[in-house]
Image: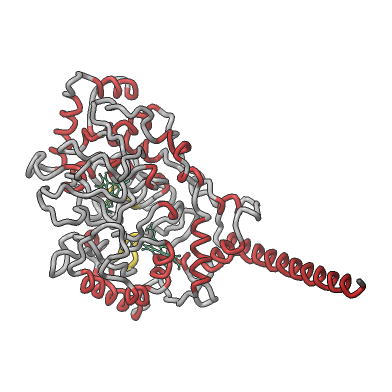
Amino acid sequence: MFQQNSLRLAILLAIGSLAACNQSDSVDLDNQLQSLISQQNLTGDPSRGRNLPSINTPLAQLGKKLFFSKALGGDKDSACVSCHHPSLGGGDGLPLPTGVMAANPDQLGPGRMQFSNADHYDGGPNVPRNAPSTFNIGMWDNTLFLDGRTESLGKTAKANGDDGKGIRTPDSLFGIADPLAGTNLAATQSRFPSTSIEEMRGYIFELNQSNEAVRTALVKRLSDQAIPNTWGTEFERVFGDSTLSYARIAEALGAYERSQVFINTPWKRYIEGDRTALSDSAKQGATLFFTSVAQGGAGCNSCHTGDFFTDEKFHVLAIPQIGRGKADGVTLDDDFGRYRESKQADDKYAFRTLSLINVEVTGPYGHDGAYKSLEDTIRHNANPEAAVAAYDFSLSNLDSYVQHNNAVANTQAALAQFKSLQSRGVSKLTPVNLSDLQVTQLADFLRSLTDPCVKDRSCLAAWIPENRDGGVDGLQLNAVDAKGNPL
Ligand code: HEC
Ligand code: HEC
């Protein structure tokens, strides 16, 4: 009896001291992370100090209707939402988008394919880059597009677009303001998808016309709907008169997108003082993220800086180069990224640092969706050369077929560029071999950057048309998944 009791006591003592030890470890972890957070001046809230519209404003409501209307697609088979659906993380859930001429234009996400008799059909997606999320788009201050071809020329922090020096776009030369740019980056960017052949314009609409001529034709289309003045009535409600113009369309689309503020993350709650908001594993991951490689960390925040987790600059990472490319390189299926715009040799294969807020739901990852899992993406960002060596260039890992004829050679060229920048000390990435445990910890941290709203259809309902009817013009895209279930 005595023996049994003393054994029990010994066990209880052992458990007690283990628990105490865990607790003090966890306090140490919190203290360490707290000091990293204050060193970086993080608040957890990238929306701070920004004046972003609510989805309930009339302008954002009009933008929602336009965003979901196939009327802005040349052949009326593609809308903004085709590649940026709120239920798909503000993207399309595909490595690369199928834009125009989809087998079923209203079917989004995995399984969406091009109509096999379509012009330029080659079995793979017709758009060369991954569709980034529109979530939190109002938090980019300097550049939109993965090569920054919509760019604020002021470059002042918190400019949030046009700060008086104008915005450069694909319609103007590098470094020169576009006189037709909108009042912010999102509105300005939204002038371009409808002029892109593969995304929305199609191969026959307004053949050989300028971007502006395409926009004029679309405005005319919206003005002459079968039921006269339906869009006119919508515009009158917002602007006070029924005049349609692409500038107004762009402001409305921009307002809808800028209302997609999804930043209430466990990470924010943690910074605000709730020590229980993050698991210990996520805290370990955060510590790795914000600690340099020289000091034993993973050095992620040398590029993923600040509360929005991006320096908005361009870096060469040699993410495997898959897809049809942007007609660069000797085989014309490569994508030179920022170099296409800046023509600076060091920018060849550089892409903009992506934000990591809600990254859990924005896969596949990288500028061309080459990685399906967050863990593999993290491995690549830690050590590009090792990740390229381990990459499955048959692409059997991806859910859908993607062109990859010269993917090995193109990726090797990008890797050679990465190594050249490394050897000249220009690259901001210090390669590090992470253990599987560290990769898991980093992934747990990145998953703490998810606002629960983005995984909750009822919370997202405000950004999706309520009635699954034709909308204003009979062309509303009522999205379904591969099984025909409404998104
Ligand atoms: C066929 C798919 C497709 C359609 C349709 C489409 N987009 Fe995109 N969108 C993309 C791709 C791909 C990119 C990235 C292109 C690049 O960086 O070169 C992009 C980029 C963007 C960006 C910039 C994101 C960032 O992080 O810089 C915004 C904003 C955006 N699109 C909004 C829209 C709007 C508004 C519409 C409708 C007018 C639209 N898109 C239609 C595929 C699409
Ligand atoms: C040298 C700058 C740099 C460093 C250091 C860096 N990243 Fe990145 N990260 C980028 C760039 C640039 C991209 C986009 C690359 C592309 O698309 O080609 C990116 C993309 C990502 C993505 C994909 C996001 C998406 O939506 O597709 C994740 C996840 C990511 N980084 C995580 C990390 C982690 C974790 C670390 C630390 C181990 C890290 N990064 C270190 C610059 C960097």
Q: Is residue 55 above or below residue 394?
A: above
Q: In the rendered view, does 286 fall on the left or right side of 162?
A: right
Question: Farthest residue toward the right?
Answer: 2
Quadrant in the picture for residue 486: top left
Can you give x and y, in whole percent of width and height, for residue 138 in the image?
40, 44
Residue 176 picture location, percent across and down: 24, 51
Q: Is residue 17 above or below residue 80?
A: below
Q: Is residue 276 visible?
A: yes
Above or below for 244 versus 407: above
Q: Is residue 410 left or right of residue 88?
A: left
**Percent of width and height locating residue 444:** 52, 61
Nearest to the observer: residue 220 or residue 94: 94
- Residue at the spot 19% in from the left edge and 44% down from the top edge: 103
Residue that sits furthest to the front in the current view? 1
View extreme (left): residue: 208
Q: What residue is rendered at 40% in x and 68% in y?
A: 381
Color theme of the render: secondary structure
* Quadrant including the C terminus: top left
Image position of 437 (left or right of 483): right
Location of the N terminus (image quadrant):
bottom right
Q: Is residue 189 visible?
A: no
Residue at 81% from the left image edge and 68% from the top image edge: 12
Quarter assignment of residue 475: top left
